[in-house]
Image: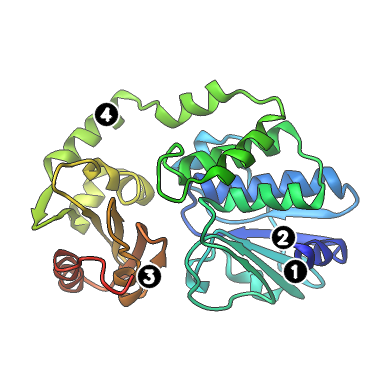
Amino acid sequence: MFEAVLAAIQDSQRIIIHRHKTPDGDALGSQMGLKLLLQENFPDKEIYAVGDSSRVSQMMEYAKMDTVADELYEDSLAIILDTSAESLISDQRYTLAKSTVRIDHHLFIGKIADIEVVDSSFESCCGLIAQFAMESGLRLTPLAAQALYTGMCTDSGRFRYDATTARTFRLAAFLMEQKFDLTDIYRNLYADDLQQKKMKAYFIQKIQTAGHVAYIYTDLEEFKSLNMDIFSVSRGMVNTMADIRDIDIWVNFTETENGVLCELRSSRYNINPIAVKYGGGGHAKASGATVANKEIAMQMLADLENWNGENT
């Protein structure tokens, strides 16, 4: 599956690794895991990682982004990870690269790169990178394995979501052959400071329902008053609505200067078609989109209220 990817890497002296904006554990884990993997196996090559930061970046303190000048993209290979649409890629300079590769586990929307490895049966992009390392016979370092394990863990919901398979655990075991501290990973994943606990309680009080859908709506004025980054409010709070009895779908709407961020989740249905309808994408049970205003967001809510998984 990865023969063309490995050949492109071997043929390139300079490799610049991209992923989606506002990175989560899988985006950062796959990016840093791949960077460290390539540095270990191709020490004579220039390997860079670029993009914006998020709250997760603070949890993964080794996930440092590089400063890359425009001219370095000339004759380079850009690798795009964990991204289903061009508009979601952090740092659009990947278009300046001589050649491009995409490795992704989201549902396929359209071609982005010259070489594409897209397999939505994987629980995470980190799982795909681990599979790449295994199939290609590449040496892992403990920190590369830790980064990849972190992304596998977070994107599988701590190995709970439907995409978790026997292959997931085989790849996790492959990573765990390296010596890294599992306790440290889970301590960072589960720990909240007191202010975070209070903020989750605040958002729980905001939950409303529409049929079998739970939702939270945060307008722009309220968002600004919270003094929180957009990741922490939007993606960070969506699962405060998880595991509510008789609720099959939940969505977190967050107004920003650039539109309303919509984080969609479901324990039962494929809600990806709704996200795609509104210009987004993602996975069957975890997708996202950005819409222009509250009126359109409420149209999405109505669609979700009437959604029963048809056309999945």
Is 279 on the left-hand or right-hand side of 70? left
Lower position in the chain sequence, tag 2 or tag 1: 2
The image position of residue 87, as x and y in percent, is 48, 72
Foreground: disc 4 or disc 1: 4
Give the SS element for disc 2: strand
Q: Please give the residue where the numbered disc 4 appears in the rendered image.
A: 197
Q: Please give the residue where the numbered disc 3 appears in the rendered image.
A: 280
The image position of residue 154, as x and y in percent, is 47, 41
- What residue do we see at 17% from left, 42% from top? 244
Q: Please give the residue where the numbered disc 2 appears in the rendered image.
A: 16
Lower position in the chain sequence, tag 2 or tag 4: 2
Is 45 on the left-hand or right-hand side of 204? right
Q: Which amino acid is tagged 4?
A: Lys
Picture layout, residue 211 above or below residue 65:
below
Q: Please give the residue where the numbered disc 1 appears in the rendered image.
A: 73
Picture layout, residue 33 above or below residue 265:
above
Q: CA distance from mark 1 to mark 3?
A: 28 Å
